[in-house]
Image (cartoon, helix red, strand yellow):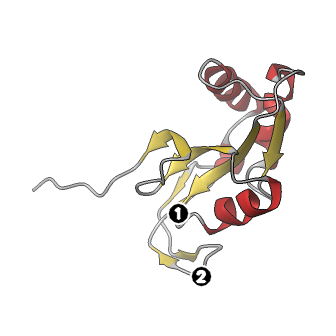
Amino acid sequence: MDLFLNESFVSHAGINLDFKIDCDALSDGDLETIAKRISRHFIFGKIYGVPRGGLRLAAALEQFRSPNCETTLIVDDVFTTGTSMEDARLTVGMDSVGVVIWARGNCPSWIHSFNQLAEWAGP
């Protein structure tokens, strides 16, 4: 299974995209490493994994929860429009912090991306 698929698909938000980032290709070890890196930057007591993409990352982050912290970390695999993350934020609280593995563009200030993609501006 490849992480990047050079094929058209329709995103969760209904947008036609010309390639897909398939985080199902990431191993459990990959997600554990990403979770450890995330835990070095955020203190959180609760985790909300956006279904379906964020559930595996949320599970990998469980071991890094701080029991006395009230901050909720909302996690997802790929940020495209932010619809899923905004919906989750309305559900779990506006003071939540968001983290995604990949962002296909610029995220709002409350969402942080482990990896950022941008359109290539080269020749």
Residues at marks 1 and 2, CA–CA distance in whole angstroms: 11 Å
- Provide residue 94's location: percent of width, then percent of height: 69, 53
Outermost residue, left direction? 123
Report the residue at 48% width, 40% height from top.
115
Q: Is residue 8 above or below residue 35?
A: below
Of mark 1 and mark 2, the one earlier in the sequence is 2
- Residue at image mark 1: 80
What is the quadrant of the C terminus in the image? bottom left
Report the residue at 61% width, 76% height from top.
13
Q: Disc 2 marks which amino acid?
A: Gly
- Residue at image mark 2: 14
- Provide residue 74's location: percent of width, then percent of height: 72, 46
Q: Disc 1 marks which amino acid?
A: Thr
Between 123 and 105, the one nearer to me in the picture: 105
- In this rendering, position of residue 12 left or right of residue 118: right
- In this rendering, position of residue 77 left or right of residue 28: left
Report the residue at 77% width, 55% height from top.
50
- Provide residue 63's location: percent of width, then percent of height: 85, 21
- In this rendering, position of residue 29 left or right of residue 81: right
